[in-house]
Amino acid sequence: MHNYQALFDYVQNLSGKTLSADDKQIFTTHFKPKRIRKRQYFLQEGDVCKYTGFIVKGAAKTFTVDEKGHEHILKLSVENWWLTDFESFYKLTPSRFNIEALEDMEILQITHGLVEEFIKPIPAFSAMQNVLSQNNTIATHKRMQSSISQTGEERFQELVNDYPHFIKRFPQNLIASYLGLTPETLSRIRKNSLK
Amino acid sequence: MHNYQALFDYVQNLSGKTLSADDKQIFTTHFKPKRIRKRQYFLQEGDVCKYTGFIVKGAAKTFTVDEKGHEHILKLSVENWWLTDFESFYKLTPSRFNIEALEDMEILQITHGLVEEFIKPIPAFSAMQNVLSQNNTIATHKRMQSSISQTGEERFQELVNDYPHFIKRFPQNLIASYLGLTPETLSRIRKNSLK
DNA sequence: AAATACACATGATAAATGTCAATCTATTTT
DNA sequence: AAAATAGATTGACATTTATCATGTGTATTT
């Protein structure tokens, strides 16, 4: 069973508004369930991100690959988050990112056109969007500040405090990449901070 | 003369909508002109950011100070940008940032309460807000990606390409701080990249 | 005009982080 | 169960960046 309830709860929580039965009907009509298997790509660099997906189950990484072939993880996404490259999705431009499933996933996906036509007019949804983009801006500013002013060790400690479930759920090489460190460096940081 | 025209143009450009004479009247009634002299603080760490200001003239830095007394610049703001700590302004929580004028400034400022009551209901304004937060998200993601995946030299080159006027307008020690580097390191990077 | 503060550069050295290679373990696949 | 793969750790060494001290020229302030 595809759990639309998670999506309803999410929208209602963030917006502080209630969804009517009609609203819910519109959601279930236009958001399509999709399964993505571990290691499968949701988006490839150079493609336009046609869909945005609400994650019902599973996790994914958003990353780039540099000239040396090294991955850099910009984002780790889990349940009750949105899976998309916002820039590509909204502007319909080719994406600079790859998005790949880290576990088997179940998402509810929708195209830009359908969001604009059917979903955005729902007040709870656009209210949710505003709150979401605020939260996003705040979180990204905090991460940016860490990035320019703290050492690897401090950034790691902050991540442990702010998102302890990330540490448990994802292997250390992914955490390292997310922090802008090599796996070797993170391994040594952890070793030293045990003292 | 306080240039409300710059604000009108900005809102209309970003939103793609036209402001009526009534709309403009609402803007001029609630946005209050304010002058800030060079080195004066617009916001101090620990205070709630009561106002958001539209920059008509001048420039400012948003920064933190670490335990060692070193400044870290999160944002450099110039004409036609908003001067505020969004987190503090929207959530009415004490700010982690300082905002200080780098030049004599002229801004149009307004409180959170007045925005919510009088300004947000103007369709062009809320449309502008959406576009602005999208642009912001995109720009911050790009900066974040640079930060985790590029060297100081690469980040500097990107800044030169993306915001050449910043390089001309601000001294190098501020640019260095914005890039997460010490002034000495940026000085050496520039020397080496002349080859 | 003198005094002060600021921006920038440079040398010497230290600290943080990256690179490459090897090894070990745990997990997944066959 | 065996084989293959992925993740984590460690050592040796290189590179990047920070730190501290100092000098110099230029604005700013007094």
Image: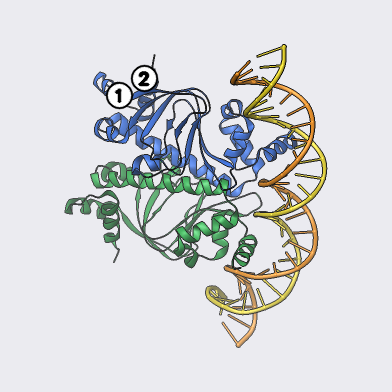
Chain colours: A blue, B green, C orange, D yellow
The residue where tag 2 is placed is A4
**Within-10-Å neighbours for mark 2: few <14, some 14–19, many 20+:** some
Tell me the quarter of the image containing the N terminus of chain B: bottom left
Question: Which amino acid, mark 1?
Answer: Phe
Q: How far apart are marks 1 and 2 (CA)?
A: 8 Å
Q: Give the left or right position of residue A131, taking residue B28 as reference.
A: right
The residue nearer to you, when weighing A175 against D26, is A175
Q: In this view, does B144 lie above or below B161?
A: above
Quadrant in which residue A47 is drawn: top left
Q: In this view, does A110 lie above or below B122?
A: above
Q: Earlier in the sequence, mark 1 or mark 2?
A: 2
Question: Which amino acid, mark 2?
Answer: Tyr
The residue nearer to you, when weighing A81 against A12, is A81
| Residue visible at 28% across and 44% down in the picture | B127
Residue A27 numbered tag: 1
Residue B87 percent across, percent down from the top left: 45, 42
Q: Give the left or right position of residue A63, taking residue D12 as reference.
A: left
Q: Give the left or right position of residue D1, taking residue B60 as reference.
A: right
Residue A13 percent across, percent down from the top left: 38, 26
Q: Is residue B46 visible?
A: no
Which chain is indicated by disc 2? A
Quadrant in which residue B78 is drawn: bottom left
The residue nearer to you, when weighing B104 against A154, is A154
The residue nearer to you, when weighing C18 against A149, is C18
What SS does tag 1 mark?
helix
| Contact check, label 1 and label 2, Cβ < 8 Å | yes
Quadrant in which residue A31 is drawn: top left
| Residue visible at 30% across and 29% down in the picture | A124
